[in-house]
Amino acid sequence: MMSKPKIATTSLAGCFGCHMSVLDIDDRILQLVDLIEFHKSPINDIKTFSAPCLVGLIEGGCCNEENVHVLKDFRKNCQILISCGDCAIMGGIPAMRNNVPLKECLEEAYLNGVTVHNPSKKIPADPDLPLLLDRVYPCHEVVKIDYHLPGCPPSADTIWEALVALLTDKPLELPYSLIKYD
Amino acid sequence: MTEKQAEQIRKICQDYGGDKHRMMDIVREVHAQFGCVSRPAMGWIAEATSTHRVEVESVVSFYAFFSEKPQGRNVIRLCNDVIDRMFGADRVAQAFEEAFGIRVGETTPDGLVTLQYTPCIGMCDQPPAAIINDQIVTWLSTDAARHIAEVIKSGKKVFEAWQSVGDGNNAHPLVHAMVHNNIRKRGPVIFDAFTSGAALSKAVAVSPVEIIKVIKASRLRGRGGAGFPTGMKWEFTRGAPGAQKYIICNADEGEPGTFKDRAILTEMPDLLFEGMTVGGYAIGAKEGILYLRGEYTYLLNYLEDVLAKRRQANLLGQGILGVPNFDFDIRIQMGAGAYICGEETALISSCEGTRGDPKNRPPFPAQQGYLGFPTAVNNVETLCAAARIVDKGSTWFAAQGSAGSSGAKLLSISGDCKAPGIYELPFGISVNEMLAMVGGEDAAAVLVGGPSGQIISRAEFQRTICYDDLGTGGAVMVFGAHRDILAIAAEFMAFFEEESCGYCTTCRVGNTILKNRLQRIIDGKGQMGDLAYLEHTAHTIKALSRCGLGQTSPNPILSTLKNFRDEYEKRITAKDDGMQPAFDIAQALSKTEEIVGRKSTHRQA
Amino acid sequence: MSGKITLIIDGQEIEAEIGQTILDAADAAGVYIPRLCAMKGLSPHGSCRVCTVHVNGRPQAACTQPVAPGMSIENETPELKAHRVSVIDMLFVEGNHYCMFCEKSGNCELQAVAYRLGILAPQHDYMFPCRGVDASHPEVFIDGNRCILCGRCVRASQELDNKNVFQFVGRGIHKRLTFNAPNNLSQTDLAGIDKAVDSCPVGAILRKGTAFSVPIGQRLYDNEPIGSEIESGRRTNDRQV
């Protein structure tokens, strides 16, 4: 029996809304798993790549070094990468910090914010906390991305049409109703 | 702002009749008096000229020489053009920075000095050069910079300390500039001897229509770079309906590498003003405007004096040469540091007292130009040639040059050559012949036409300089093999980004896009796909932009892609591994590491 | 010269009148040429360049180019579409366009033209500029992040409201919208009912208190592409979109 192609997914600096949208394909997931097998993904909690994947679905942009590490891992292990959602495509809401100096961001978050209680008065430097990048980077600025699906999140139908096109080797041509940036 | 200051501003506005169309002059004078045009000052100017404060702010914010924030009592504008940088402008900048304790772009805390960069000031034949308090300093060395700094700090005027002046009228008491003409090759059209009145007396002996016929027969084409037939332009302007007509001389000479009009203004102003007057006669204008770039402020008093003498000699004013109803006079409109104002409709906008935005066409200036009236805008050299043609005949002129490009052309040649300067040469000369003349036979690249022209390699040095082949308004830059041609292209893109007026999307955003992507390649972070991206983005900018700036600004990239492609390819070393070579994680983390106080433990390539 | 003439747009003859711009004539004939800085009732501007067509082979902005007899115009060609996509992409990367929370989303002309062109993501690098917002006015909110420098508000304030509230300052990539005031919008004579407030094609100028009042699915461009309203007025029914 030929093994099915694999799909991996991740949420980097994302809210998981795009993952929820994937799951909004509802019972079409039964058709999907006939065509493809889920590999590393929050959906099944497989944590590492142990096989090459055909498709990698990326939610969220890169806000810290761990995001970059994971994204590069996805690029190495997936044939096709899809930036799913506005955060992956342009940084999304996390990228609103791109006009605020980095020091100010960290101080607001850990020292001066209205609801912060931090008696140490220090910005945390634990080595387990990934370091923030100087700004939020859209995914295509870090690795080559093959497809972009806009939306916040892209609708389940948009994601479905894209996956079906890719898996049946057809060109991706979204109708007007499935191209939305909000 | 005190009431006394407001009163001074009102007086300046009144001197210009409270006319908002004279905003450039008003802002210049307020700026000269107060060292800036502050927000309160904008309000006073608006009130005194019956316009809106935001319109004043629009003008002040558009031109590089105007500032809302107070500038130093001494303003040093160091030219950072390609040629000046080739000859040490960076070291001179550093010397000034060290001497004053500020970086370029800043003002000393005590308000003594503002230090700025400025693009080409028309001194590429004597680099590095600077404008200091509107006076020109050439052949700057780091020693000279330190000396100038000491003079400024001691409270003395910079040019009391300066003894040397240049040749010709650079030594005239009203000029007193250390500029050298460097006219290496004179020709019969421009720098030949000229007697004031020689052309005018012949012009008034025939009808204006006859003058236009003569100019058409000479096949004279505009010498500013665009090459529009002058006779046709004058004919359209004459024939257009309008209560009055205007002739404007474009002395903005902003294309980097162009300094030939500088020499004409210094040595042949009578020929120029005669050409303007002949043109005024031909089209039926009573008023001419000389739009003089702000960088040539050092020539202003001298040129006003030439005009005054022409009025005394009955060559300007009422009843010129005794001809009744032939009234014509010229005023000088100063620019204020905006390359785009060399574009004829942007120049007109500037004359009308607004930001230098080019206008929608049609209508063309010949139909509706200055203040809505038919206007002919001509280059300095064109008007001189026109005067000479009227004096010596169209046949004499048309016999020189080539079929599509009659007459001669002033070339201002600079860069890696033994004899930079101004050459009057017949059209149709090859680049090889030109290089032999200037002592630039070792050239690896030649730029004809300034950054908006073409950069060619040795493979094309047999091509000729004329409108139908390598066209130019005069700028020619010679680059030796040791020069980094891509770095030069990048400097040109930075120039266009800075000088774009910002009106249309493609030029405003596109030049920044091209500049950034080219820099990425130069930094070794490019990939092969970047070349096709640069090419098709460049074509969109050229095709869709509204005026000549955006229609030619991608040329440094397009011509180097075509003629120096290996320079691009050798810098592209990225592996095809799916990673973006432009992303540098070490760089992206360095600031965080500094703030947080620890280095990344996970960072890999 | 006055009177009716014939133009050819993409091989089809349409009627036009001397004095019209190409854009006017196309609109009247039900031919959609995408545009952003052009607006009915305002003088033509020619800044966005989206309406660029080929006139007898040469690129011209349809909104500023007057019609003339014998004009042969190309509008829907792959080359022009590629140019327009690039220009729309430039507008997206030049500002900070966060469609996901923008009050104008679904009614936004920039977004709608991008949808119609099938743009999924811009081809140019995001610039993430630093732009200001001004919430000082009691009725009107300005978000500079979204401004596409189309100048419709400048013209509308001058031509329709007889005021001069808006103007551009700065040059080149630093050009930005500002107000006829020492400090902020509340110091101008802008009124909430001014036509300038309605003139903004994007979410840069918004009337306070009106956000999200139209449900998703019922917004202007949710179901039909921008330009449908022009095309549905066309006389012949056999043209493919």
Image (cartoon, rainbow, N blue to C red):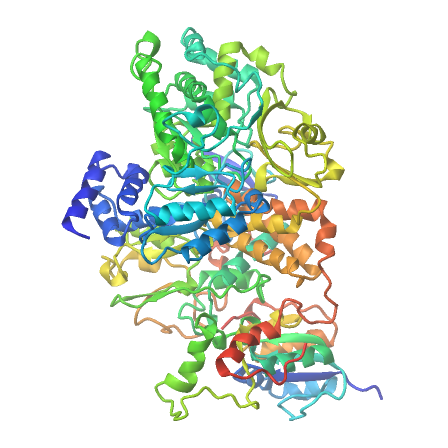
Pick the quarter of the image with the N terminus of chain A.
Answer: bottom right
- Which residue sits furthest right? A1
Q: Is residue A154 left or right of residue C183?
A: right
Q: Is residue C105 left or right of residue C198?
A: right
- Foreground pick, B495 / C224: B495
Q: In the rendered view, tell whether residue B433 sits above or below residue C48.
A: above
Residue ID at (64%, 28%): B466
Front residue of this view, candidates C34 and B433: B433
Query: Which one is in front, B134 or B336?
Result: B134
Task: Establish if C63 lies above or below B123.
Answer: below
Q: Is residue B6 left or right of residue A178?
A: left
**Does B225 sit left or right of B272 as displayed?**
right
The reply to whether residue C36 is visible in this rendering is no
Number of numbered markers: 0
Question: Where is residue A127 drawn, in percent x and y?
Answer: 57, 89
Res B528 → quadrant: bottom right
Foreground residue among B167 and B325:
B167
Locate residue C147, reporting x and y percent: 41, 60
Q: Position of residue B107 (x, y in %)?
A: 37, 55
> Where residue A96 appears, x then y in whole percent?
46, 73
Residue at 37 percent of width and 26 percent of height: B173
Farthest left residue? B3
